[in-house]
Image (cartoon, rainbow, N blue to C red):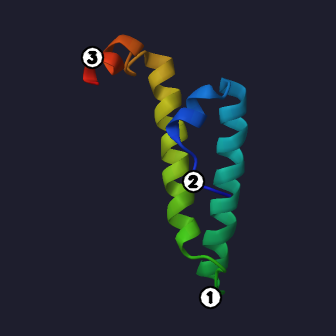
Amino acid sequence: MPVMRVKEIREMSSDDRMKKLDELRTELVRLRTMTGAGGSVENPARLKILRKSIARIMTVDHEETYGTGKTEEQKRKKK
């Protein structure tokens, strides 16, 4: 699975984001238990990718909930 971009996450509905968040957390727990039990993971960098993807989803969800994200006007001014 490729890295999830913020643009892709923002295009998802809230329900889709929560489903994806659950999937990623489940996979992260599975990989952590494998490494904790002394097993080897096929792609160790996957742990980092999962953590960052979870953080991105949670950030976008928080921005939508509290309205702290950048508006379109602020984005255009930056360019």
Q: Which residue is mark 3?
A: 77
Residue beneath label 2, please? 3
Q: What residue is drawn where x is 55% and y is 66%? A: 47
Residue 12 lies in what quarter of the image?
A: top right
Up-down relation of residue 52 to residue 28 (above or below) = above
Of tags 1 and 3, the one toward the viewer is 3
Q: CA distance from mark 1 to mark 3?
A: 51 Å
Picture residue at 60% right of the left edge, 80% below the top: 35
Q: Residue 16's quadrant in the figure?
A: top right
**In this rendering, position of residue 49 left or right of residue 75:** right
The residue mark sitting in front, 1 or 2, is 2
The tag on residue 47 is none
Query: Which comes sooner in the sequence, label 1 or label 3?
Result: 1
Residue 1, image quadrant: bottom right
Kindly report which numbered mark, 2 or 3, lies closer to the viewer in this rendering: 3
Label 1: which secondary element? loop
Q: Amino acid at mark 1?
A: Gly
Asked if 6 appears above or below 67 in the picture, the reply is below
